[in-house]
Image (tube, rainbow, N blue to C red):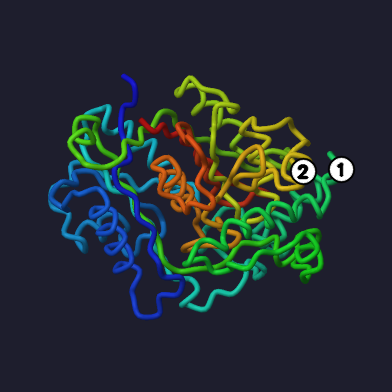
Amino acid sequence: MKNPAYIVGAFEHPTRKAEDKSTAQLHAEVAYGALQDAGLSASDIDGYFCAGDAPGMGGLSMLDYMGLNKIRHYDTTESGGSSYVIHVGHAVEAIIAGKCNVALITLAGRPRAEGMQTGTAVRSSGVGVPDEPFELPYARTIATMHANVASRHMYEYGTTSEQLAWVKVAASTHAQYNPHAMLPKVVTVEDVVNSPMVADPLHRLDCCVISDGGGALIVARPEIAAQLNRPKVGVKGWGEAYKHQNAGGIDLTYSAARFSGPMAFDKAKVKPSDIKYASIYDSFTISVILQLEDLGFCEKGKAGAFVQDGGLISGVGKLPFNTDGGGLCNNHPSNRGGMTKVIEAVRQARGEAHPKVQVPNPDLVLANGKGGSLGTRHGCGTVILERE
């Protein structure tokens, strides 16, 4: 088959601080937005996918809350911010297997409204987590774990803070055209490297925003997609992979995208040079550097040179990325950015991105999500989408 399933609905919640909404309400609102985008109703949904951001009993609570009464299959795979990219692949596989015809994927959260400030606090994941007795005494945080990765990449390959800063510059150049972006101001390399140090060598502007909101996607069987009056965006390839500490034998210079990317490219029967646009998970600037290399857009150790001088800026560079401003400038809802990566890839494939950043002839686009911490354990999901 050409494409076994299609993304027929996509919606990103416009709020960035949801003081007057519950997490469940945000899930329902993004689901409604995606249904409206697709031209479908709740009664058409027979597959549901969510992750650890869903409140209560996760999928069970949300099915009840949203009144989804015709569900034949649901999946609550939890892989942090990469979950929703992985869910796209799982939805395609469920459709191929005949488990469902129309799958809804939702993400929502409100960490900003609940007072979360930064990723520099030592936080426990809960009682009984096996790694924490060994790691928390060393004050492990999200920022310091990514800083370790950045330091190692600099040591091994000569990557510089200025090269990391070019990732933020590209994201901010795109964010200026997004009316919902939290940080719409264009910044320079000097702005980034002169911003306060958060965890050496990462500065404040090397870090993503913290936001509320969410997003949703609808994946449908080809026969159903053909009946809808929407641009056809097929899921051509998908892959998922995981990386952990390996009992201390961990190499910090690569991510799990080294494995999820080739899976997706192999399914799609295309290569990195065929991709016209890429949504790359950008919780930190170093996250983008590793994923660009691991997905095959440049050689290992060469991503610093690849991004500098505007290599990721639409209309300027070799590979336009995160044209909504990404997690660095636009939105990182519930601290989980995989959903918004797929949504912007869909916008690009449809030709619905802002005219100032829309990529010409975006027939093949890619989204990669990362969940967890590069310095400890994480998962990656990759999807390749084709505009027909």
Residue 295 drawn above or below residue 368: above
In the rendered image, residue 99, in percent from the top left (x then y), is placed at 22, 34
Crowdedness near tag 1: few (<14), some (14–19) or many (≥20) residues, C-alpha within 10 Å = few
Q: Nearer the viewer, mark 2 or mark 1?
A: 2
Crowdedness near tag 2: few (<14), some (14–19) or many (≥20) residues, C-alpha within 10 Å = many
Q: What residue sits 46% from the left and 49% below the top?
A: 344
In the rendered structure, the answer to whether residue 261 lies left or right of residue 100 reads right
Which residue bears the numbered disc 2?
304
Question: Which of these two is toward me, 83 or 244?
Answer: 83
Question: Which of these two is toward me, 111 or 8?
Answer: 8
In the rendered structure, the answer to whether residue 189 lies left or right of residue 338 reads right
Name the quadrant of the C terminus: top left
| Label 2 residue SS | helix
Q: What residue sits 72% from the left and 44% below the top?
A: 307
Residue type beneath disc 1: Gly
Which residue bears the numbered disc 1?
158
In the figure, residue 118 lies in which quadrant?
bottom right
Numbered mark located on residue 338 in the image: none
Residue type beneath disc 2: Gly
Q: What residue sits 35% from the left and 48% below the top?
A: 76
Do tag 2 and tag 1 residues touch (Cβ < 8 Å)?
A: yes
| Label 1 residue SS | loop
Question: Which of these two is toward me, 105 or 1?
Answer: 1
